Image (cartoon, grey):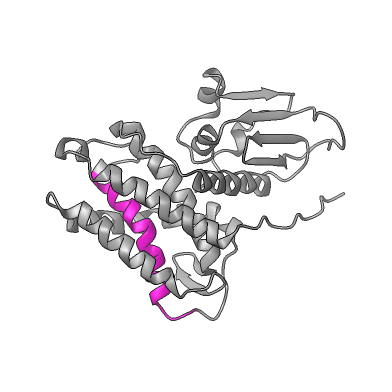
């Protein structure tokens, strides 16, 4: 018997906007402290250096600025949970645009100026734009409110990428991390529909996933529990299931509580 389709999770547009703004401000402060030596460091993202990674974070918001500035599309082409699986097909275009932006932001004031300008233009773009306004994105027409939710994922993930190589310890805005956690948990539930496994990412998300016997009361027979940052790394391929389990960052119980085959869910 097919599982009933769950109502999509809703997000408070005002809280999402505030979270995106706050997380970008945290990264802005961290990037301003980077030395030329740090900017040249390799990252865990292919051939990108820290400079390219930092430029990409600015591009995360510039995509919103650009989308709002363009004429409103007539059709909504994508829903929020289509986005995680769709990102991979645009990787080459993202890489090209990121390198171009990084090359334009050379010199000691290049990245700080880019971040300051981006923050100002982002605030201006959102000033009169309602959340239900459709905007142009790489993925097609999408409501601004939904696209901003995707920006919390990008900002959270890339803040972690920056911290991993630079030691900046850029903080994670709680609302941005919570939203990112929920989007990626819901993406898993969409990719692996079912009710035999319960994924718990306290304090932000609990979802049912993986086809099989469905529990209705009491403690489910298959439980996976982890923290938000570990879940983010698993869901985006920054760490493997085996690595997280071996490091005791994931607690998994039950014969179906192995999510390796379903990961990552982004891209």
Name the side, left or right, on which 216 lies relative to 252: right
Question: Could you tell me residue 96's position as x and y percent?
Answer: 29, 57
Q: Quadrant of residue 124?
A: bottom left
- Please give the count of numbered marks on the rendered protein: 0
Q: Is residue 19 above or below residue 256?
A: below
Residue at (56% x, 77% y) in the render: 75
- Provide the residue span drawn in magenta: 51-72
Name the side, left or right, on which 141 lies relative to 122: right
Q: Toward the viewer: 75 or 26?
A: 26
Q: Is residue 69 magenta?
A: yes
Question: Could you tell me residue 29's position as x and y percent?
Answer: 29, 46
Q: Is residue 231 above or below residue 143?
A: above
Q: Is residue 209 above or below residue 106?
A: above
Q: Is residue 45 magenta?
A: no
Q: Main secondary structure of the magenta part?
A: helix
Question: Could you tell me residue 35's position as x and y percent?
Answer: 17, 38
Residue at (47% x, 56% y) in the render: 18
Q: Toward the viewer: 13 or 136?
A: 13
Query: Which residue is the extreme one toward the left?
Result: 107
Residue 44 appears in the picture as rendered: no
Residue at (23% x, 45% y) in the render: 32
Q: Is residue 201 above or below residue 175?
A: above
Question: Could you tell me residue 152's position as x and y percent?
Answer: 48, 51
Residue 99 appears in the picture as rendered: yes
């Amino acid at each position: 018997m097919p599982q009933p389709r769950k109502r999509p999770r809703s997000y408070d547009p005002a809280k999402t906007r505030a979270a995106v703004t706050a997380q970008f401000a945290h990264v802005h402060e961290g990037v301003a402290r980077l030395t030329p030596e740090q900017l040249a460091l390799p990252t865990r993202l292919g051939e990108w250096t820290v400079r390219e990674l930092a430029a990409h974070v600015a591009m995360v918001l510039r995509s919103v600025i650009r989308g709002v500035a363009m004429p409103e599309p007539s059709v909504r082409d994508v829903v929020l949970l289509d986005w995680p699986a769709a990102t991979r097909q645009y990787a080459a275009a993202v890489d090209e645009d990121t390198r171009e932006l990084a090359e334009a932001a050379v010199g000691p004031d290049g990245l700080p100026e880019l971040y300051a300008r981006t923050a100002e233009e982002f605030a201006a773009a959102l000033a009169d734009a309602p959340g239900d306004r459709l905007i142009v994105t790489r993925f097609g027409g999408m409501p601004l409110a939904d696209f901003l939710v995707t920006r919390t994922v990008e900002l959270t993930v890339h803040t972690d990428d920056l911290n991993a190589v630079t030691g900046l310890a850029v903080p994670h805005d709680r609302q941005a991390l919570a939203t990112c956690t929920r989007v990626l948990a819901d993406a898993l539930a969409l990719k692996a529909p079912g009710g035999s496994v319960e994924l718990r990412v306290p304090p932000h998300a609990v979802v049912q996933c993986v086809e099989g016997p469905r529990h209705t009361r009491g403690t489910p027979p298959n439980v996976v529990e982890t923290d938000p940052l570990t879940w983010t790394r698993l869901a985006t391929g920054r760490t493997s299931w085996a690595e997280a389990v071996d490091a005791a960052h994931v607690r998994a119980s039950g014969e179906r509580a192995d999510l390796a085959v379903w990961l990552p869910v982004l891209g």
